[in-house]
Amino acid sequence: MADPDKVPSVARAAPAPLPVAVTSAHRTLWGVAVRRLRRNPPALLGLAYLVVIHLIAVFGPWLMPWDPFAADPLIRLAGSSTGHLLGTDEIGRDVLARLVLGARVSLAVGLVAMVISVSVGVVAGAVSGYFGRKIDTVLMRFTDAMLALPTLFVILAALAVFGGGPTTATVVIGLTAWMPVARVVRGEYLRWRVTEFVEAARAIGGSDPRIMVRHILPQVIPSVIVAATLNVAFAILTESAISYLGLGIRPPLPSWGNMLQNAQIYIWSAPNLALYPGALILMTVLAYNFFGDGLRDALDPRLKL
Amino acid sequence: MGWFLLQRAVQALVVLFVVSTLTFLMVSLAPGGPEIMMTMETTPEQQEALRRQLGLDRPLLVRFVKWTASALRADFGRSFSHRRRVNELIAERLPNTLLLGGTALALSILIGIPAGIISATRRYSVVDHAVTLLSFIGVAIPAFWFAILLILLFTVRLGWLPASGLATPGAPFSLADRLAHLLLPSLVLATAIMPNLVRFMRSALIEEIGQDYVRTARAKGLPGRRVLSRHAIRNALIPVVTVLGVLVPRLVGGAVITETIFGWPGMGQLAVAATIGRDFPVVMGLTVVVAIVVIVSNLAVDLVYGWLDPRITYG
């Protein structure tokens, strides 16, 4: 032990055993995680679905023989046929082509919003947990206040002010989802900053930013990945809701949410239109949640191996 | 207790002030006010006249002080688009939203808590797996799509339930009619929070069942049912109550979607209309009212929490 005066009081008061990643060749954190994931069917199923849907989102629009924007009023609300596998929408556009392009749009919004929310959350949580004191109090009270506000309401108010559209919607979704990430990351920084390797790094003259990024951040990555997975699910769900309300992705660009915008009007004549996009949202969000939950279990070092 | 209440009340007022100030600044500093809604058919002079008429040409600080002064008297000014007072609009819709939210909350508790209990007491059984899967689906399903599915089934196919509105237009008041209109929207809104409630109840009860006092109760010969109802469930409910406090904001957010789909004349529907129409006084008024609802419900949860768990003291 180093000079006891240098050790923060928390370290002496709570010598709780820290979960340490075992770094022998056979039992790395990730090796263990992969083995545990293999024994979790819902998580594997989720992962498999996610791989497929993302491949479709990336390559699908180029491979589709139909134009997602070409309207043909003569065949509006047509059912499934060889000409249009999943039929046509209310102005005669091919539903399958729009679903595939919509996958690209919805997943892109989800992923970008996730990057925003995770970045903000990690920075806020790291600063809060590492420096503690006043900064921590102020940041955490702010986080609590943000958590207490109804997300959708805040998003609506923000869109009222800054106008709708894909970019604004994505940014706003990202900025309303960082709070849980910040809380998790803060907790981790609180725990790691009093460990011996951090103390050692400080003893040889490591600066605060360097310790935060080079030494503690790698320990936090597993929790961040779990939070990120769940945040994509949340972002996709939120995008679909605000696009449904007509404030997110605007037609003619399709997203799974805005494809449902008119579904209610045609619910009597073309109920199928309402089914496909919603089913895709449900399955994608479900897959992200299953995978995220499986990852959380797989990466939790407190569980027995 | 009195001191605690006072402290929390002061905190609540500070939060309320910060929230409304931030919203006001955001709304006021944004490019383009309500006049951009009518750029199509108006000249710049007419737009300027409109700005003057709505008081938007005055300095920010003057507007803020004026707004705060009237807000303190619970007066949120006039709507830009409705030619009515914001207060009237909100007063008209608040009861409807409270009715919908209250019913959804009751449904979630009445279904969610027992489901969580069954799931916990029959851990890893078929029932448990089914409940868990359903709660995963409940979290992942888009509320508006769930609503469309329900309408498709109960209105379009079966013709049992109405798909929109508070009551059948023109028909005399009947309780059955009101309940029929309430059922689908409140079910959809309930899914916004029920899955969390189920999963939280399940894990809280599993934790309690593993406690020593439960083993003691069993050891002294209490029947399992009684151990559960008198001891384990009671203690497991305590953390569940706090979660309810966190879930109330989500109900308010869910109301936006639910009310829009079911044509329910509440605050959520008003919020969507005000957003699209850039009706800033309405957006501001709703923000304050929603913040009050959330703050009051959190305070209520704090108080109930202390009453449920005598170990908690209000220091």
Image: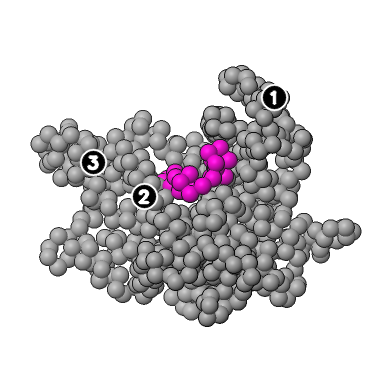
- Find residue A259 and report its horizontal and vertical position in percent: 56, 62
Residue sitting nearer the eye, B191 or A108: A108
Q: Is residue B150 above or below residue A154?
A: below
Secondary element type, mark 2: helix
* Labels 3 & 2 near each other (Cβ < 8 A): no
- Find residue B54 and report its horizontal and vertical position in percent: 69, 27
**Crowd band around label 2 with a 10 angstrom C-alpha radius: few (<14), some (14–19), many (20+):** some
The residue wearing badge 3 is A212
Residue sitting nearer the eye, A243 or A174: A243
Whether residue B131 is visible: yes
Q: Which mark is residue A115?
A: 2
Residue plotted at (45% across, 36% down): A142
Q: In the rendered structure, which amino acid carries the disc numbered 3?
A: Met
Residue plotted at (48% across, 62% down): A102
- Find residue B81 and report its horizontal and vertical position in percent: 72, 37
Whether residue B295 is visible: no
Badge 1: chain ID: B
Secondary element type, mark 1: helix
